């Protein structure tokens, strides 16, 4: 069984309210580290092969995806899915989600809120500019609220489900959905300790421990503590992660799983650098344009998930899941507003205090039936969630008397800081109930048909406490999808799929009415290849996506929006991953993507979308071998290319006047990875990012909010297992 139901998803519970840093430190000091494969319980249930701690000789190519919610192997699934395995994460030396994005085709970075969250677009289509694209954690939504950059200490793999997933998960982008799969307990005792030091004051420690407690209970605990400076002046970050998990066999056919995570991330909100006359590089990439006296903005997230699974027979099983999440963000920041001709940058001071609660319940029944010689894998599901978010933001705007400006060429910090006053004070409530069904049909040995549909009923309200006005609406949506695969040989698959998506828009128009949801239509045509030994795989896909009801400026009421915009995304994706020969692992991608605005009240029709390149690609290759004395080594590297991207949306008036578009230049970066395994329990690693120290810009929101890419970074690590 390989469904999200119980074999692949690790899930989390309210075991702790807050686990102090002292626990993390004591766990880190507990000793070395171990990596072993797990042994199944006596009845063979929940068997797996998994490594504890950073390892080698693992796989890049995956055969299944938990997020697809089907037992069909990925080669037979009529959908493009890209999985970043734990081995790929380890080879990249990745500690955050951002570290792997360059090696997944068709993914582009969006506004990351000054370094306080992850925000990406898949196939050129971004999600909500405040909360980002649809992201799942073990199949539960994890992007409602405000979420710190994802740490990978407790992550087993990352699944990029290309195309629309609304038929299974509801509100999402038609370009794709991201599913994070956490590490799960193993049934063989194993422990790992890792320590890292590197450029810009990096210090990081991680601890991973797992094993059985008796015959029916197994645990896992992942802990990470990190403290780093930055190539940016006055900018550093501290984070603590604690991720416990357990698996409890309540009976021969019943399993209860828990996964929990507490994450605290503190860093100054950093809007980056500015462009002068549409030109980047006028000031150093290290220059900070905020105020050091503001201190850190702190983001706290905690997640608890329970999953109860039961095998009713050899062909039917059920799954009931409960997820509870809390998020918060609090702190001061100073953010650029406009650049004057003399080099003075006016700024606005803000204070944010955001918090949210999110509780979700899922129930699924999955099984197989055979009718007329045709096998059906059926999935029936129901989901409901309740989400509340309190948002308080105070602002102090610059004035002629107090411009609160800084000279970008000769910055002087420590000016009198204005006191922000009330600007936003809202309470948002979201409620949803949904039902979905999916049928994966084996029409014959050569044909597979997957069809599904989901019906969502939303209730949304937004209370403006300053005005006392509440905007409310109850949108509903039905999201179907269908896909067909043809398997002419054991190695080749040809497939096609079509589906619809929707995503509720938040906020209200000038009349305090809610906006109609965004809707999308996605078409995909592709082919897949898998080697006979299932160690290599490749996918080529053509896609055409249309999205409607995108928020755009109200042409009559300045400062308000209407749901009237439309976007089109078309492209070609090529992906390859796997073991090439006995000693090489390779991961490669190339994407051509054309995304443009087809309808808008303000923005240039035919214009591009922010931060989306027409071309991006990457290659990662690692070579492994051993010495006569039993020691092993690996060495490799990666190259990524990101094409030119739009850096600030261009209006119709600017286009008519011939105002040049502001673009982020294309860039190519390289990295070096290496390890030396001294003995079966001890390893040394070396990671060098941006090997040639290229100056580049990873994303932008406007000419005065441009995020520079990191300078060359060298990290040395020591990993021990026991």
Image (cartoon, rainbow, N blue to C red):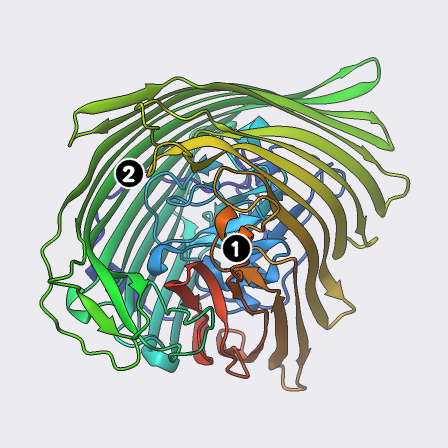
The residue singled out by tag 1 in the image is: 657
Relative to residue 433, is residue 482 drawn left or right? right
Which residue appears at 41% of the width and 72% of the height? 276
Which residue appears at 75% of the width and 54% of the height? 537
Q: Can you see residue 38? A: no
The residue singled out by tag 2 in the image is: 14
Q: Can you see residue 610? A: yes
Q: Find residue 165 and report its image quarter.
A: top right
Relative to residue 418, is residue 389 drawn left or right? right
Mark 1 nearby-residue class (10 Å; few <14, some 14–19, many ≥20): few
Q: Find residue 277 and report its image quarter.
A: bottom left
Residue 174: x percent and y percent?
59, 37
- Residue 498 vertical position relative to residue 664 in the rendered view, above or below: above
Residue at the far bottom: name it.
Answer: 628
Mark 2 nearby-residue class (10 Å; few <14, some 14–19, many ≥20): some
Residue 155: x percent and y percent?
47, 53
Residue 130: x percent and y percent?
37, 45
Residue 370: x percent and y percent?
76, 17
């Amino acid at each position: 069984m390989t469904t999200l139901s119980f074999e692949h998803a690790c899930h989390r519970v309210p075991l702790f309210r807050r686990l102090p840093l002292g626990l993390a430190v004591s766990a880190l000091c507990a000793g070395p580290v171990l990596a072993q494969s797990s042994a199944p319980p006596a009845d063979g249930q929940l068997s797996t092969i998994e490594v504890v701690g950073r390892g080698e000789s693992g796989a890049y190519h995956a055969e299944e995806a938990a997020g697809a919610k089907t037992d069909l192997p990925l080669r037979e699934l009529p959908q493009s899915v890209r999985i970043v395995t734990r081995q790929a994460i380890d080879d990249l030396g990745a500690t955050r989600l951002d570290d792997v994005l360059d090696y997944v085709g068709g993914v582009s970075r969006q506004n990351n809120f000054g370094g306080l969250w992850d925000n990406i677009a898949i196939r050129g289509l971004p999600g909500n500019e405040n909360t980002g694209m649809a992201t799942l954690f073990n199949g539960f939504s994890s992007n409602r609220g405000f979420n710190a950059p994802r740490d990978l200490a407790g992550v087993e793999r990352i699944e990029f489900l290309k195309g629309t997933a609304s038929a299974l998960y509801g509100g999402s982008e038609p370009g794709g959905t991201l599913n994070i799969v956490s590490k799960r307990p193993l049934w063989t005792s194993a422990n790992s300790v890792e320590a890292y030091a590197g450029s810009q004051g990096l210090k990081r420690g991680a601890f991973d421990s797992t094993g059985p407690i008796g015959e029916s209970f197994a645990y896992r605990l992942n802990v990470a503590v990190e403290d780093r400076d930055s190539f940016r002046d006055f900018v550093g970050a501290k984070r603590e992660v604690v991720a416990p998990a357990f698996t409890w066999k309540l009976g021969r056919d019943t399993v209860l799983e828990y996964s929990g995570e507490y994450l605290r991330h503190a860093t100054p909100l950093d809007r980056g650098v500015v462009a002068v006359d549409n030109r980047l590089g006028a000031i150093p990439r290290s220059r900070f344009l905020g105020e050091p006296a503001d201190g850190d903005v702190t983001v706290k997230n905690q997640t608890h998930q329970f999953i109860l699974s039961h095998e009713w027979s050899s062909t039917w099983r059920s799954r009931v899941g409960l997820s509870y999440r809390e998020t918060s963000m609090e702190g001061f920041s100073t953010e650029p507003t406009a650049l004057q001709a003399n080099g003075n940058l006016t700024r606005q001071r803000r204070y944010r205090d955001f918090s949210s609660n999110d509780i979700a319940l899922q129930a699924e029944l999955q099984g197989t039936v055979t009718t007329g010689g045709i096998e059906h894998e059926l999935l029936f599901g129901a989901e409901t969630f309740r989400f509340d978010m309190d948002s308080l933001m105070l602002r102090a705007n610059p004035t002629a008397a107090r411009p609160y400006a800084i000279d970008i060429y000769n910055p002087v910090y420590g000016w009198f800081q204005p006191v922000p006053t009330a600007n936003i004070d809202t309470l948002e409530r979201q409620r949803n109930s949904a039902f979905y069904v999916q049928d994966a049909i084996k029409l014959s040995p050569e044909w597979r048909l997957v069809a599904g549909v989901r019906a969502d009923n939303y209730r949304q309200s937004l209370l403006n406490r300053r005005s006392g006005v509440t905007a409310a609406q109850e949108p509903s949506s039905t999201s179907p999808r269908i896909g067909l695969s043809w398997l002419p040989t054991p190695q080749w698959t040809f497939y096609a799929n079509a589906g619809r998506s929707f995503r509720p828009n938040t906020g209200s128009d000038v009349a305090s009415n809610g906006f109609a949801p965004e809707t999308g239509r996605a078409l995909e045509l592709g082919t897949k290849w898998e080697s006979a030994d299932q160690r290599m795989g490749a996918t080529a896909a053509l896609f055409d996506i249309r999205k409607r009801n995108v928020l755009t400026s109200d042409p009559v009421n300045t400062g308000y929006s209407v749901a009237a915009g439309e976007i089109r995304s078309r492209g070609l994706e090529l992906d390859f991953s796997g073991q090439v020969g006995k000693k090489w692992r390779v991961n490669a991608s190339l994407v051509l993507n054309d995304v443009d605005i087809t309808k808008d009240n303000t923005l240039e029709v035919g214009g591009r979308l922010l931060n989306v390149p027409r071309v991006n690609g990457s290659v990662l290759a690692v070579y492994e071998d051993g010495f006569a004395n039993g020691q092993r080594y690996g060495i490799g590297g990666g190259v990524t290319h990101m094409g030119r991207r739009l850096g600030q949306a261009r209006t119709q008036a600017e286009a008519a006047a011939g105002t040049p578009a502001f673009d982020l230049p294309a860039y190519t970066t390289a990295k070096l990875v290496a390890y030396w395994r001294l003995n079966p329990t001890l390893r040394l690693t070396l990671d060098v990012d941006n090997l040639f120290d290229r100056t580049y810009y990873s994303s932008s929101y406007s000419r005065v909010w441009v995020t520079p890419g990191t300078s060359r970074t060298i990290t040395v690590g020591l990993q021990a297992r026991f």
